[in-house]
Amino acid sequence: MFDFIIWGGATLSLAGLLGLVWCILRVMKARKSNLSDDELRASVQAVLPWNLASLFLSVIGLMMVILGVSLG
């Protein structure tokens, strides 16, 4: 039972980590494309909700792993 919580949490954490890497790559691409300040700011602001969602997903996954390990 607790193995499912641990592996599910690890999967969520990995998905969140992949989302964070995607956000980093997207912002790096925007920075290298020589956009104006306003366009760069708009690009970064468009990535911000995805960044926060990925971070939230990672934290929830790590909490599930800790919960599964401590209860199991």
Image (cartoon, grey):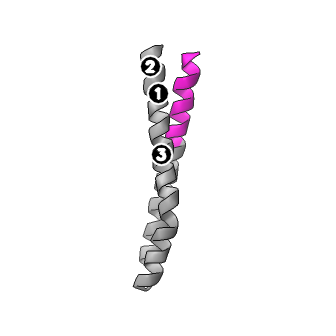
- Mark 1 surroundings: few (<14), some (14-19) or many (≥20) residues within 10 A: many
Q: Is residue 1 above or below residue 12?
A: above
Tell me how far mark 3 sits from mark 2, CA to CA.
Answer: 20 Å
Image point (54%, 44%), residue name: 15
Give left or right: position of 8 versus 67. Answer: right
Tell me how far mark 3 sits from mark 1, CA to CA.
Answer: 14 Å
- Which kind of residue does numbered mark 3 sit on? Phe
Image point (43%, 76%), residue name: 41
Whether the magenta-drawn stretch holds residue 65 is answered as: no
Q: Which residue is mark 3?
A: 56
Task: State which tag comes first along the sequence, 3 or 1.
Answer: 3
Label 2: which secondary element: helix
Q: Which residue is mark 1?
A: 65
Query: Is disc 3 in contact with disc 1, using a CB cutoff of under 8 Å?
Result: no
Image point (55%, 27%), residue name: 7
State which region is magenta: 1-14
Q: Which residue is mark 2?
A: 69
- Which kind of residue does numbered mark 1 sit on? Val
